[in-house]
Image (cartoon, rainbow, N blue to C red):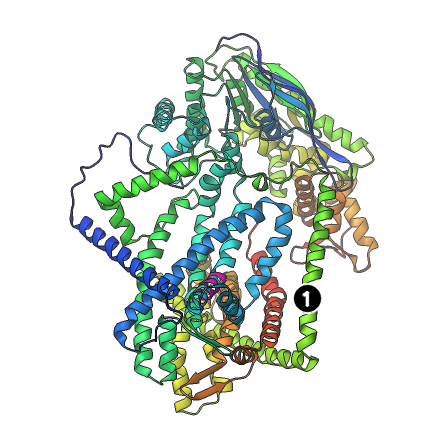
């Protein structure tokens, strides 16, 4: 890796916001300063929806920031430039092109002579271990091989900066491990012309394995909340004590941000427009039961939970967060601790659980109370979903509003607070509720 | 668009000729000769003002079939050009979309057969002579029966190009031209080919109807199968009708084998799904080309040329640039654009009203609407009858994969066959047995389009998930409950798709089905189609226009009030997430 410490790509006071219908702008990224230096791999971590993929696209010139600028090779970057290549989470291969054609397609814009382009493509294919697959179509390949094509296509352009958007998250654990190791080998042996890498990931271990520096992005709005250097030698081992310490530190940083933002919502008077995580009731039930039972006995570290349940952080966090919002548990210092109500919930039968969830929804999730109040006030005790959707969209993005409403619908139905008919898209009150 | 599939490191086989080469070369030479001969004849009318007399000799049929096919091909090329430009424009510019898409929607609902008289007069007045004008009018007509749904499909595809492919192509800095040929067109290809096939069936129907036509004093008979049949009807020659049906059958079969099978087999690689297909469409012609050395070499050099064109970094004019990015405030441009649109529509509306009020009275409108009611009743009744027949039959076939496999191609063939060639046979029977034309002409309207319903239901039943079938069997759900709760919801979206096509086609066909003749005998089933046909014969343009307008309103109304809600309902109910 080596290399000096000069910035190759520089994001200066980058912000991105969208105009909402109500007029107030919805900020996705706020005032982000970020330099990627020669010789380093930088990791971007954060909750889903915190804008890390947008940030990567801004760095690649695919998305224009609303304010601020990206400087690459001393010039402002306004569109994708030669020297920057992207590896996509979904591979983004052209299904109608063979492996070789896909790699060559990435070279089209360079205007190389046909023969030269073919050589470059062939080199990249060899390097990334795809030899023999040149004439295969992507649909004939496994996920791991497909992402190898994605890597080969990027590497063939001999990029100075490589941007990777969760490149391993669509792969199974074993495949991801192999591909990651292969890439790190090439990086460490300096076989690539690439001088710097920016990788978005939601796997904390992956980030600590690969990166020299980690940036934790907070959400609503996205800012750089913490920067954690990873000063471990390579190759790295998960069994190292230091490795574990850094993983813990990242967990703590991530959860600290989550709790801070949850608290901020509660305090603000617009509490009912709080975005809710999509946590299925069954999963919440399951997690509470597991944390309540031995060996955890009411308190479990998130990392341990994620590992023992083979859940990705992105799958575990929404559930833990939902329990935190409902005050069945508390997230603190990278651990999940059941509250008294949580313990009661764990040992109750279905009816007791429903009753408890009902009470907690009304007390701690203001939108539930809001829906119930509206249903109560309206004639016929019915209200269209659109109404709440519109109200939420004044404060949240469309996706967040949709997710929040889906979460609340599922919880409210389980708790028998209200009914919802998807055909008519109407909420209605349940007579016996309360 | 091209995709050379040569494998690096594989030595190319030495090109030695084999039997495949000979067969393929013979085929190519035959096709080139045939197309050349047809084209030469088509251009002849430049010299002669009148097209040659039609002959009922069966020996002249191959020539007529060739002429008919050539018209189809020319119209198809025009449709592709139109699709690529109109669809791209609508997809790239929000303002263009505002105008172009609703316009396309209306055009789609206007009965093609209705305005043939207008286009005929227009082209005859434009072209140096009557034969060429009629030729152009026929081709334009076929074009209008094909282009709209192809364009819709292309537009839809352009709007749904997966985000990651779009980002990848931008990230690797493709120019707009490269993006078009290397991402957008390939992505749109499967839908486009499928819609082209659907269009084709309408096209055959239309080409037959448009070759022989009389508007007022203008009598046109272009050499082709349609004119041949028209003459056979005039001379009450049932044997000649039989020959024409045979010729058409052979023509469609050849067209299918030589053009469409290969196209479908080739387009299979553009499928976006990343999973391997269970059934790969095959074509003996494509296999022949792939396994024939001399042809493969030729194909590859064509491919290389196409590649060079597609990867050229042409930049298109700013018109084609992506949405937004203008210096003027968008509100201002929007307002100006709305203003222009409103003015244009106001002007057209004013002209229409003026034309309408000079030649037409309210009695005429009532007459047309009344006739529309009769046809509406017919279409509704026919759809119900076709449903009662084809839903049970289609389900029975579709649930037996081995039967379905054999029946499906037959259905597709029947759908492509121009039903109007069969009309004389039916009319002969009606005359022979003195049946009531008001009732017995009606089935002709749906004769050609019922097959869409049939093969859609079969496709639905074939695609019905096995685990649902097994669940129903395990819980011994049978009889009416099985129909109501298991299979009918399962095939419903497919059924609706088929029924929309069938009903749209029936409206169009009413123009040739409600008023027919057999020699001197004229049968008039009354209805809007008969009304338009009568007015066309009389050359009464105001009333033709009135008839078309009423029919368009009825078709649009039926689509909006019945089919679209049904379709939306089907989509909502059969979704699992």
Compare residues A428 and A219 and report the one nearer the observer. Answer: A219
User: What is the x, y in percent for residue A48?
Assistant: 62, 32
Q: Is residue B483 left or right of residue B346?
A: left
B76 up-or-down from A128: above or below: below
Does A83 lie within the magenta span?
A: no
Compare residues A74 and B56 and report the one nearer the observer. Answer: B56
Residue B48 sits in quarter: bottom left
Dot 1, how many residues are within 10 Å of its Cα: few (below 14), some (14-19), or many (20+)?
few
**To which residue does mark 1 refer?**
B351
User: Which region is colored magenta?
Assistant: B137-144
User: What is the x, y in percent for residue B477?
Assistant: 48, 66
Compare residues B490 and B564 and report the one nearer the observer. Answer: B564
A30 up-or-down from B298: above or below: above
User: What is the x, y in percent for residue B140?
Assistant: 47, 62
Q: Is residue A79 left or right of residue B131?
A: right
B435 up-or-down from A16: above or below: below
Q: Is residue B466 at all visible to an observer of this figure? A: no
**Subunit ID for the residue under disc 1:** B
User: What is the x, y in percent for residue B459?
Assistant: 43, 61
Q: Is residue B497 left or right of residue A67?
A: left
Quadrant position of the N terminus of chain B in the picture: top left
A178 up-or-down from B120: above or below: above
């Amino acid at each position: 890796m080596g290399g000096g410490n000069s910035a190759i790509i520089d994001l200066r006071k980058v912000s991105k916001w969208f105009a909402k219908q109500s007029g107030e702008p919805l900020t996705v990224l706020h005032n982000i300063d970020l330099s990627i230096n020669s010789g380093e791999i930088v990791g971007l971590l954060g909750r889903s929806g915190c804008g890390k993929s947008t940030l990567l696209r801004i760095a690649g010139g695919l998305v224009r920031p609303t304010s601020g600028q990206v400087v690459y090779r001393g010039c402002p970057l306004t569109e994708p430039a030669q020297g920057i290549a992207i590896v996509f989470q979904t591979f983004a291969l052209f299904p109608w092109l063979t492996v070789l054609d896909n790699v060559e397609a990435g070279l089209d814009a360079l205007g190389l002579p046909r023969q030269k382009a073919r050589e470059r493509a062939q080199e990249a294919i060899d390097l990334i271990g795809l030899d023999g697959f040149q004439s295969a179509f992507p649909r004939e390949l496994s996920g791991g091989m497909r992402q190898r094509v994605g890597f080969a296509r990027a590497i063939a352009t001999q990029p100075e900066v490589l941007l990777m958007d969760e490149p391993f998250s669509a792969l199974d654990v074993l495949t991801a491990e192999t591909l990651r190791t292969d890439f790190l080998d090439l990086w460490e042996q300096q076989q690539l012309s690439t001088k710097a890498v920016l990788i978005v990931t939601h796997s904390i271990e992956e980030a600590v394995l690969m990166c020299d520096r980690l940036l934790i992005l907070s959400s609503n709005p996205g800012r750089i909340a913490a920067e954690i250097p990873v000063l471990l030698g390579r190759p790295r081992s998960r069994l190292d004590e230091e490795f574990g310490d850094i993983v813990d530190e990242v967990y703590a940083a991530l959860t600290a941000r989550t709790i801070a933002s949850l608290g901020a919502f509660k305090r603000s008077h617009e509490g009912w427009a709080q975005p809710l995580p999509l946590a299925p009731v069954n999963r919440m039930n399951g997690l509470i039961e597991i944390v309540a039972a031995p060996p955890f006995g009411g308190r479990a570290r998130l990392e341990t939970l994620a590992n023992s349940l083979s859940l990705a952080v992105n799958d575990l966090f929404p559930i833990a967060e939902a329990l935190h919002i409902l005050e069945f548990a508390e997230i603190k210092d990278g651990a999940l601790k059941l509250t008294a109500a949580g313990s009661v919930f764990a040992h109750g039968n279905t009816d007791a659980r429903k009753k408890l969830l009902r009470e907690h929804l009304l007390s701690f999730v203001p939108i539930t109370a809001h829906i119930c109040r509206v249903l109560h006030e309206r004639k016929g005790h019915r209200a269209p979903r659109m109404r709440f959707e519109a109200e939420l969209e004044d404060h949240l993005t469309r996706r967040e509003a949709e997710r929040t409403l889906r979460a609340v619908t599922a919880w409210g139905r389980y708790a028998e607070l209200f009914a919802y008919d998807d055909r008519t898209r109407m909420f209605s009150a349940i007579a016996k509720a309360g | 668009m091209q995709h050379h599939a040569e494998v690096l490191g594989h030595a190319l086989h030495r090109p030695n000729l084999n039997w495949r080469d000979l067969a393929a070369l013979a085929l190519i030479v035959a096709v080139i000769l045939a197309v050349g001969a047809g084209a030469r004849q088509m251009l002849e009318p430049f010299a002669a003002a009148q097209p040659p007399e039609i002959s009922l000799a069966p020996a002249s049929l191959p020539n007529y079939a060739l002429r008919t096919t050539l018209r189809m091909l020319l119209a198809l090329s025009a449709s592709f050009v139109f699709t690529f430009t109109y669809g791209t424009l609508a997809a790239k510019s929000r303002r263009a979309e505002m105008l172009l898409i609703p316009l396309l929607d209306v055009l789609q609902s206007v009965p093609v057969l209705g305005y043939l008289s207008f286009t005929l007069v227009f082209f005859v007045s434009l072209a140096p002579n009557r034969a060429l004008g009629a030729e152009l009018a026929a081709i334009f007509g076929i074009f209008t029966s094909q282009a709209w749904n192809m364009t819709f499909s292309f537009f839809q595809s352009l709007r749904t190009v997966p985000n990651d492919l779009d980002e990848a192509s931008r990230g690797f800095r493709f120019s707009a031209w490269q993006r078009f040929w290397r991402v957008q067109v390939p992505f749109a290809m499967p839908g486009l080919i499928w819609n082209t096939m659907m269009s084709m069936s309408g096209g055959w129907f239309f080409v037959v109807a448009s070759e022989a036509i009389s508007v007022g004093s203008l009598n046109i008979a272009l050499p082709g199968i349609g004119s041949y049949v028209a003459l056979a009807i005039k001379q009450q020659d049932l044997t000649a009708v039989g020959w024409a049906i045979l010729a058409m059958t052979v023509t469609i079969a050849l067209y299918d084998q030589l053009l469409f099978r290969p196209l479908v087999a080739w387009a299979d690689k553009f499928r976006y799904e990343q999973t391997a297909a269970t059934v790969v469409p095959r074509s003996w012609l494509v296999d022949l080309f792939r396994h024939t050395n001399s042809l493969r070499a030729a194909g590859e050099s064509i491919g290389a040329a196409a590649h060079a064109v597609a990867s050229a970094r042409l930049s298109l004019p700013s018109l084609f640039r992506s949405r937004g990015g203008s210096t003027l405030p968008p509100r201002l441009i929007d307002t100006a654009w709305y203003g222009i649109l409103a003015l244009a529509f106001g002007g057209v509306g004013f002209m229409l009203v003026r034309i309408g009020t000079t030649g037409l009275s309210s009695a005429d409108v009532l007459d047309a609407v009344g006739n529309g009611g009769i046809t509406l009743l017919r279409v509704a009744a026919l759809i119900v009858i076709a449903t009662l027949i084809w839903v049970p039959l289609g389900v029975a076939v579709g649930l037996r994969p081995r039967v379905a496999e054999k029946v499906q191609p037959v259905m597709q063939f029947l759908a492509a066959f121009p039903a109007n060639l069969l009309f004389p046979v039916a009319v002969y029977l009606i005359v022979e047995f003195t049946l009531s034309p008001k009732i017995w002409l009606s089935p002709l309207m749906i004769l050609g389009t019922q097959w869409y319903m049939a093969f859609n239901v079969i496709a639905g039943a074939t695609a019905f998930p096995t685990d649902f079938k097994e669940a129903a069997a395990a819980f011994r759900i049978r009889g009416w409950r099985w129909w109501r709760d298991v299979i009918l919801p399962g095939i419903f979206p497919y059924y609706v798709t088929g029924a929309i096509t069938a009903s749209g086609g029936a409206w169009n066909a009413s123009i040739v089905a409600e008023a027919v003749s057999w020699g001197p005998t004229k049968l008039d089933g009354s209805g809007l189609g008969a009304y338009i046909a009568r007015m066309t014969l009389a050359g009464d343009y105001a009333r033709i226009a009135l008839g078309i307008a009423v029919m368009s309103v009825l078709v649009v109304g039926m689509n909006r009030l019945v089919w679209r809600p049904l379709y939306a309902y089907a989509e909502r109910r059969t979704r699992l997430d």
